[in-house]
Amino acid sequence: MRVAVLGAGYAGLTLAKRLEDALPDDEVVVVDEDGTHLVQHELHRVVRRPSLAEDITLDLREVLDRATVREATVTDVDPDAAVATLETGEGTETLEYDAAAVCLGATTNFYDLPGVEEHATPLKRIGHAHAVRAEFFTAVEDATATDPARVVVGGAGLSGVQVAGELAALAREETDPDAVEVVLLEQLGSVAPSFPENFQRAVRDELEAQGVTVRTETAVASADAGGLDLANGERLAYDQFVWTGGIRG
């Protein structure tokens, strides 16, 4: 029997490891775009420490014991025919299977807010972390204490509070912290809204102690190259815009 695991994020990798143990006599095939697993919850650290990118990118062939790894993009799954269509660097291929698990993960959700996807940088991949870092230095290049650069992070879930903290630390380490204003926006009434209240309070207190301006009950309505239009009618200019407002499957 051949079992195909399509995607090697947390769910896909965990399942593949369990299948190796549970089905010792069967074939396990893992399909992933580049044959690596990204330790997603550590991604924010790459913004401040680019060298960590290698440490949080795991080669699937080294992590898995006997599963076959195929580097390809899954473009279609036909459950009736039990066939997945794969796009590789050399063309289109098919993968027949007896059982399959679709674990292709999530993408950034921009909620169809006008201009947000076009003007914000998300944080889902290593390349995004490098881009956030590069954009930060571009934003603060000519900033001064009397004319600070404004770095806006939209969305104060776990990724949002993490990247806001990293950007504030980067400002302290690499430039005049008075020349940078890090603003964290959240449409709900607290940061880290899915966590317990005591955790929310502790996170907000720490962010504010690090110099982050936290604005809850503040929703983004749209964005353009120079600023954000907030749902309350306010116009908020920015020099850098990072979006961590949510994900979708």
Image (tube, rainbow, N blue to C red):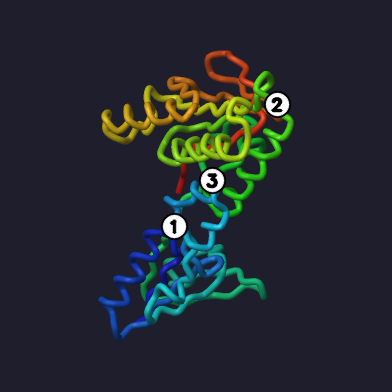
For disc 2, the marked residue is 226
Vertical order, 228 against 19 (above or below)? above
Vertical order, 92 against 178 (above or below)? below
Left/right of residue 200 with respect to residue 57 in the rendered view = left
In the rendered image, residue 105, in percent from the top left (x then y), is placed at: 45, 55
Quarter the N terminus occupies: bottom left
Task: Tell which of 246 and 121 is nearer to you.
Answer: 121
Query: Distance between the Cα atoms at labels 3 and 1?
Result: 13 Å
For disc 3, the marked residue is 123
Considering every residue shown, the one lying at the far top of the view is 233
For disc 1, the marked residue is 39
| Label 1: which secondary element | loop
Query: Distance between the Cα atoms at labels 2 and 1?
Result: 33 Å
- Identify which amino acid the numbered label 1 is placed on: Val
- Identify which amino acid the numbered label 2 is placed on: Gly
Mark carried by residue 16: none
Q: Residue at x 58, y 14 (%)?
A: 234
Q: Earlier in the sequence, mark 3 or mark 1?
A: 1
Vertical order, 78 against 198 (above or below)? below
Q: Residue at x 71, y 30 (%)?
A: 225
| Label 3: which secondary element | loop
